[in-house]
Amino acid sequence: MSGSTITPWVVGNWKMNPMQSDSQQLIQSLKQYLQAGPIDVAQCRIAVAPTAIALLSVQQQLQDAAVEVLTVAQDLSRVAGTGAYTGEVSAELLKDSAIHYVLIGHSERRELFGDDVSQITAKVTHALNAGLQIIYCVGESLEQREQGLAEQVVLQQICDLSSVVKAEQWQNIKIAYEPIWAIGTGKTASPEDAQAMHEKIRAGLKQLTGYGQDIAILYGGSVKADNAEALAACPDINGALVGGASLQAESFYKIAQAFAQTKH
Ligand code: PGA
């Protein structure tokens, strides 16, 4: 039991997966788990982040789930509104389709698709101005950790965020700490290391905003059913951003269950 009053969030980041038929099975199976063992939304909020093309159909398929499962976009355009921007999906278009949540700054976007600080802050600005809630991802590389720079890198990413967030907008933000060396590698940060960084992030947030105590800080990076409980037991870990293990209903459900049981 952590004693935290923050409702944990467990978010499945499906990345560029799965094909439609597998997605339908995954949703069906997740709904069966939730039907057989509902997880109270006050104990843990469950969300999935499918590809942009699947957002609306997944949202539709989840509508009759025994427990509300939220649908999250994996990214959005750095351009706001509508217009001649081929291939882009803006904050306003997400909102217009009743997609109220979005990931921003995932390390795969930063490393592989050139999302730099100016693009990320533009995305944050547009998302918040459109009334979306964001899950803002931070995390250091292995090299940075080995050089003793982990804390500095992560806190700088929090400062980048704070440069564009207005006082009243902090309540629409969650943080996901995802050490890059732990993503998809099977290497999870130890609960102690993860907690230590979450505590630093929490301290940083408290300096920036009166909401600091209430902002959920999720952990991501090889979260699995068998390590979720130990992570959930840490006082400043308020949920998980789950990649690989979210593509199987059983493991994803068990991770949500671990957070729901530990945080009350
Ligand atoms: P992983 O991915 O759980 O497969 O490590 C986490 C993420 O990138 O969000």
Image (tube, rainbow, N blue to C red):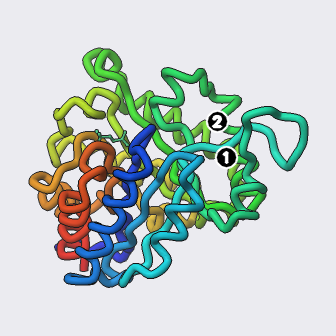
Give the farthest residue toward the right. 83
As helix, strand or loop, the secondary structure at mark 2 comes to helix
User: Is 204 placed above or below 32 here?
Assistant: above
Amino acid type, residue under disc 2 in the picture: Ile
Residues at circles 1 and 2 in contact by the CB criterion of under 8 Å: yes
Neighbor class of circle 2 (other Cα within 10 Å; few <14, some 14-19, many 20+) is: many
Q: Which residue is mark 1?
A: 124
* Dot label at residue 120: 2
Question: For the residue marked with disc 1, what is the amino acid?
Answer: Val
Using the image, tell me which numbered label, if any, was put on residue 254: none
- Image coords of residue 237 (percent x, y): 29, 57
Image check: 86 left or right of 24? right
Image quarter for residue 44?
Answer: bottom left
Quadrant of the rendered structure where residue 167 is?
A: bottom right
Mark 1: few/some/many CA within 10 Å (<14, 14-19, 20+): many
The residue sitting at 41% across, 54% down in the picture is: 202
Q: CA distance from mark 1 to mark 2?
A: 6 Å
Does the beta carbon of the residue at mark 2 sit less than 8 Å from ligand 1? Answer: no
Indicate the secondary structure of the residue bearing disc 1. Answer: helix
**Where residue 136 sits: x, y (%)?**
52, 47
Q: Nearer the viewer, residue 8 or 249?
A: 249
Determine the residue positioned at 54% across, 52% down: 54
Residue toward you, 119 or 242: 242
Between 54 and 78, the residue placed more toward the observer is: 54
